[in-house]
Amino acid sequence: MLFNSFDFGFFLVIVYGLYWGIGSRHRITQNILLLCASYVFYGLWDWRFLVLLAASSLVDFGAGYFLQRSNTLWKRRAWLGGSILWNLGVLITFKYFHFFLSEFYTLFSMNVPEGDFTIWTVLIPVGLSFYTFQTLGYTLDVYRRRQEASSNLLEFLCFVSFFPQLVAGPIERARKLLPQFQQSRSFQVSQQKEGLRQILWGLIKKILIADTLGVAVTTIFEQPEAYGSISLMYAAVLFSFQMYGDFSGYTDIAIGTAKLFGFRLSKNFNLPYLAKSITEFWQRWHITLTRWFTENVYASLVRYRKNLNYWSTMPALLVTMTLIGFWHGANWTFICFGIFNGIILIFERIPLQHHRTVSGWLSKQNRLFSLIYFFTITSISSIFFRATSISDVWIILERIASFTMNDQFSTIIGWKLMVLPVMIIAELFFRNNAYPMQEFERWLPKPARWLVYYVLIFLLVRYAAPQEAFIYFQF
């Protein structure tokens, strides 16, 4: 069930009506409804994986329960190890098994038996990486005594499966989201309006921006050998904006939907393309994932080093970014994506004079200079991310570097490209807000507001491309 589908709209209206019909005085009943709705939402993707979702929830609920009550170090480590083994085992089994098997056969020059293990190429539970990291993060926080273990199974199940952010984040900390299931949620008109506006803005970014740009991007990336340097560079830049429109659009819909039920989710994007360096970019892009890896991987790798300096943190940074790349998918393109970003981050951390780094120096430079630097790096990075294979990556980079000019500049999406600068201008102008339409009531009278809403809804219905799944659903 896609967020940009009428099916989800119908589903949301039913759950919303039942939820507030129950009333805020019956919090437990509301939680039961949310849990049932979340399991229905997930089950409509593939009902078989509901067992896996429930099992992951129960394993980490039990691990947290016993971690809280264990006082000896070896017992606590045993329960934590069990949680890590389960979560990573599930990820490896369903997401990376086929990749490792294929590489094993390739390494020893063996032919992959035809028909063997093909099930693993299609049976990848949607949102597996997101809810697995969310539950594992909970266990790690309980182990480090940053989080009290939940003693209420219903609330914990709701925390893991909350349908607005179940399949593509944000990856929430238990200490932020779990308490919201433990307290009553009151109906607030202002919060409902805010949620609906943010959903509308997310749909605009997904349908009018991401899906439109995706037409050109897919056409060019599927046959890179048929296009020249300009078209390939054009597609790489467009893909950066397609990714932003797609993923931040999903996040806006998720946050807006959560607001309709009285919940607050974490901000996952902070105008990443205003960054002057890749270091700053990763502080603004997919914030909850970067935070998860920083706290649970990078910090663990550098925790026991006696002297923290550039040379001692460099390997930890490279390992962390490589794992972030691999988190996105079982393909060498994602691994190289992570390694490439790790190398750039290492470069930007090179210490300069006056206790400054390269990234600090970049932050002081002219906006045009930083813009050229930033989009050059992100465009190369997006080629690794979007290409279907490493061989395609080399084809694209080679054709760009050789200035191949044997094709016309692609105008495959024509005048529809005009919606991109409209989105950019809107987000720049309202950059101090959570989203551009947040304060409509303050600066637009009611007739003008409703005119804007009707026009935007008309554009969504009139110019919507065929429904496309959100890119991050595959992760």
Image (cartoon, rainbow, N blue to C red):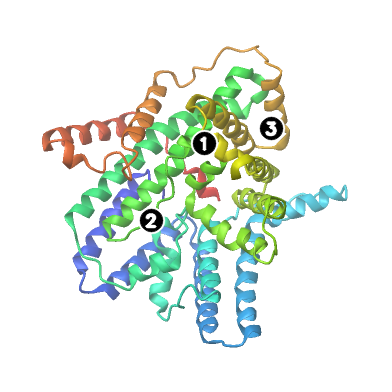
Circle 3 SS class: helix
Q: Earlier in the sequence, mark 3 or mark 2?
A: 2
Q: Residue 217: x, y in percent? A: 54, 29
The label shown at residue 363 is: 1
Circle 2 SS class: helix
Residue 401 vs 155, above or below: the answer is: above
Q: Residues within 10 Å of mark 1 (few under 14, many from 20)?
A: some
Amino acid type of the residue tagged 2 in the rendering: Pro
Q: Is residue 280 left or right of residue 17?
A: right
Q: Residue at x 68, y 67 (%)?
A: 304
Contact check, label 1 and label 3, Cβ < 8 Å: no
Amino acid type of the residue tagged 3 in the rendering: Val
Q: Residues within 10 Å of mark 3 (few under 14, many from 20)?
A: some
Q: Earlier in the sequence, mark 1 or mark 3?
A: 1
The label shown at residue 393 is: 3
Q: Which quadrant of the figure has residue 336?
A: top right
Q: Is residue 24 left or right of residue 401?
A: left
The label shown at residue 428 is: none
Is residue 356 at all visible to an observer of this figure? no
253 or 77: nearer the viewer:
77
Residue matched to label 2: 164
Residue 439 vs 299, above or below: the answer is: above
65 or 40: nearer the viewer:
65
